[in-house]
Image: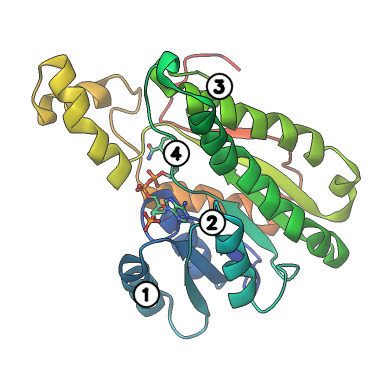
Amino acid sequence: MDLGIQGKWALVGGASRGLGWGCARALALEGVNVVMVARRPDVLAQSVQALQAEAGTGVTLIGVAADITTEAGRAAVWGAAGGPGQGFDIVVTNAGGPPPGDFRQWGREQWLQAVEGNMLTPIELIKTTIDGMAERGFGRIINITSSAVKAPIDVLGLSNGARSGLTGFVAGLARSEIATRGVTLNNLLPGKIDTDRIRATLPAMAAKAGKSVDDMRALQQKQIPAGRYGTAEEFGRICAFLCSVHAAYITGQNILADGGAYPGTF
Ligand code: NAP
């Protein structure tokens, strides 16, 4: 299926690894030009180079090494993109998630960081890009959030809280007059997708449960109806479809990519 987005410009946050990389890759393979953002310049440069080799010379990929959750980082992104960001047709908001823990240990500073990274940053990115999309009559905004928005995970209180704030905001904006102007906003909710982040959290979880890392991985996968973790590649392709011309009638939705792990009927 031709997704009909060849030649568009996309901004993808957290794009050197994991879910952001999966989205950047799927878009680039559809002929979309992508500005890829991540903090570590060396890892980002490698990812951009590898993706350029895969996607070919027909697409332009630009790596911007910046912390997208800061004002300075976003200014670097707009600078590299040649303006204030009005030219993007597709924006995938994504960065690292807040740490797990006990809410009794979190102070105002931890909460502000979580809200800054997982609620206000996506809102700032949307604010800067959405009017340009509406003027041109086409826009796709995808926020990578978490299945924890629908089924909260107790130790991820910072994530549950901050991401729910974003979800509420997006639900309203997606249904505003912007819906008549070719712009859709959706949230893509990963369950367990096999990325560095998942691999990094396994040893601590295994130690806590008194299991080996391999046993812990097997146990987690058994609890997912699909019997496995998802892959960044397949997650990216869902994202690319939501960005396509064919997904114009999908807006204001929270779409789970979790192998059936969320147990509810709706
Ligand atoms: P990952 O494999 O660790 O990749 C994160 C990517 O984002 C890297 O490219 C990283 O590069 C970049 N990044 C992190 N913080 C950044 C920042 N402040 N500014 C710019 N780039 C940043 O993580 P992931 O699994 O893809 O997770 C992505 C998001 O989805 C996280 O918010 C996570 O909580 C959420 N999520 C993931 C899963 C899952 O199963 N994987 C499930 C639920 C929710 P640098 O470190 O170099 O910046």
Say which amino acid is labelled 3.
Lys
Mark linked to residue 135:
none
2 or 1: mark nearer the eye: 2
Q: Residue at 10% across / 16% down in the picture?
A: 210
Q: Say if disc 4 is inside 8 Å of ligand 1.
A: yes
Confirm or reject: label 2 Cβ below 8 Å from ligand 1: yes
Q: Which residue is mark 2?
A: 68
Please identify the residue farthest to the bottom as the structure is shown: 57
Q: Nearer the viewer, residue 7 or 36?
A: 36
Residue where numbered disc 1 is placed: 54
- Is residue 265 found left or right of 220 in the rendered image? right
The answer to the question of whether label 2 and label 1 lie on touching residues, with beta carbons closer than 8 A, is no
User: Which SS class for mark 3?
Assistant: loop
The residues tagged by marks 3 and 2 sit, at their Cα atoms, a distance apart of: 25 Å
Q: Secondary structure at mark 2?
A: loop
Viewer-closest of 165 and 260: 165
Instruction: Measure how far apart labels 1 and 4 are at the Cα level.
Output: 28 Å
| Residue 115 x/y as whole percent | 58, 35
- Residue where numbered disc 3 is placed: 150
Identified at 52% across, 47% down, the residue is 238
